[in-house]
Amino acid sequence: MHADLKHYGHFIGGQEQEPGARVWLPTENPYTGQAWAMIARGDAADADAAVRSARAAFDGEWGALMPSERGRLMRRFADLLIRDAARIAEIEQRDNGKLAAEVVSQTRYVGDYFHYYAGLADKIESRVLPTDKKGVFAYTRHIPKGVIGIITPWNSPLTLTSWKLAPALAAGCTAVIKPSEYTSASMIEVAALFMEAGFPAGTVNVITGLGSEVGEALVIHPDVAHIGFTGGEIGWRIYELAARSRKTVTLELGGKSPNIVFDDADLDQAVKGVVSGIFAATGQSCQAGSRLLVQDTIKDVFLEKLIAFASSARMGDPASMDTQIAPVATRPQFEKILSYIELGKAEGATIVMGGHARPDLGPQFIEPTIFTNVRNDMRIAQEEIFGPVLCVIPFKDEDEALQIGNDTRFGLAGGVWTQNLKRAMRMTEGLHAGTVYVNNYRATSFTSPFGGFKDSGIGRESGPEAVHEYLETKTVWLSSDLDVPNPFIRR
Ligand code: NAD
């Protein structure tokens, strides 16, 4: 079956390779529901081969490069990616069903991401340490950790990979990437560009297949130093497995972020921000503003404006530049979202917009859906749905907005809509979240750290700090005094 489809192998040691066990998985177009290519279904032996290849590059040619040479190669790769952005975006778009308009701009931005970190490769500075001792001199050195395992989800495959890979390469590490089994093709295509740019073979390797098979084998591999993971709850299992094999981790997990609208906000702008927060990317965004907290004085007028704006959104073929709402990326996710819509009804919430699948448009379309009469302790308000489902919860004042906004086990993001600067400052201080947006929502940049409080994750990606996730600090003590003082006492 599927013998006529394109087959994407693993990318190990600078070339595409068939999986050792010769087993393949179909990858589907969410708009049509049809398989369009096959990816390798890797196993522990494939993971081991990829890690060995990455280790050999780290101990060999890549590890021997000067930081400025690493930066030069990264810039070359970035230019090639920008050159090929339209072609690669088309592949990623076909695989995850996201809007073409968004995938094209995201793919170009991945190139910009690499340019930014290329510039940091030769700017990793150490410190001379004040020692408070005579005759000794101490300084720090920052040493690349080694082989980095990168595990990513399906919603923004290349973007979320670059958040880890670009700083890891700038730090001097090598990598083995395990993309989502739903969206692996674009990463295999991109891997070839590293070779065209002149990277030593083995610096960047890609293995594909199921998380429980090849993903877990990567996590427990003894020669992997750090795991950079974006995904769901499984991240906490990865944390435990990584601890057992003494690895460090960065985890970017889910959220249930509040988007908070006060009655002094510019309501038309706030409507756009709320829509972008929950219906862009069909709600499949980790920082989705999935709880709308609206001040009770404007609840009805705001809802009216919101429904008028959101209900005009065009659903359809995501490859068309006119489409605004794309299908859901995977069949299990489609079913999960519909089950949460049923749960919301059973919990007593009221649907005021949407609420249905749209089989007339394709196999995985769900209408943008708004629930009112939601209490914050309902499961639809506490659990991440990762789809176009908005829970509306009214509040009276700032204190209540903060109490409801923070009453969640997550802490990834939060939005505040107000024209009162003092209020905005109080809210940004009070919200327990890794990112707070004021009068905008969903922005990210290579310049700004991103990550979560509480169950939303560990560590930060992006910004100059991200390079340090991939570095060990070594302290060197140099003594100019050859006469070692009393050897039985530590000074
Ligand atoms: P997922 O957790 O199911 O899968 C993510 C990746 O982990 C995939 O590559 C998968 O194959 C792999 N995996 C699964 N089990 C594994 C295991 N036992 N060992 C090693 N790897 C394993 O997530 P998903 O369904 O692909 O993506 C949706 C989730 O990702 C949502 O919960 C969302 O919040 C989260 N997400 C978070 C961010 C963020 O930056 N915080 C961004 C995007 C998505």
Image (cartoon, grey):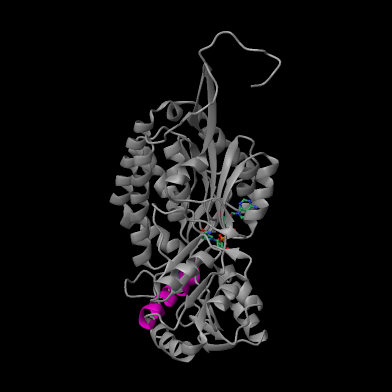
Residue 488's place in the image compared with 182, above or below, is above
Residue 236 seen = yes
Q: Position of residue 140 (x, y in %)?
A: 50, 29
The foreground one among 30 and 486 is 486
In reply to whether residue 276 is colored magenta, the answer given is yes
User: In the rendered picture of this protein, how many numbered marks are placed on residues?
Assistant: 0
**Given the current orientation, which residue lies at the most extreme top position?**
483
Q: Residue at x 40, y 48 (%)?
A: 190
Residue 413's place in the image compared with 61, above or below, is below
In reply to whether residue 226 is colored magenta, the answer given is no
Residue 17 seen = no
Asked whether, in this view, residue 139 is left or right of residue 117, the answer is right
Q: Residue at x 38, y 62 (%)?
A: 103
Quadrant where the image shows the C terminus: top right
Q: Residue at x 31, y 40 (%)?
A: 76
Quadrant where the image shows the N terminus: bottom right
The foreground one among 134 and 150 is 134
Magenta stretch, main secondary structure class: helix
User: What residue range appears in magenta?
Assistant: 267-286
Q: Position of residue 56 (x, y in %)?
A: 51, 29
Q: Position of residue 424 (x, y in %)?
A: 44, 71
The foreground one among 80 and 8 is 80
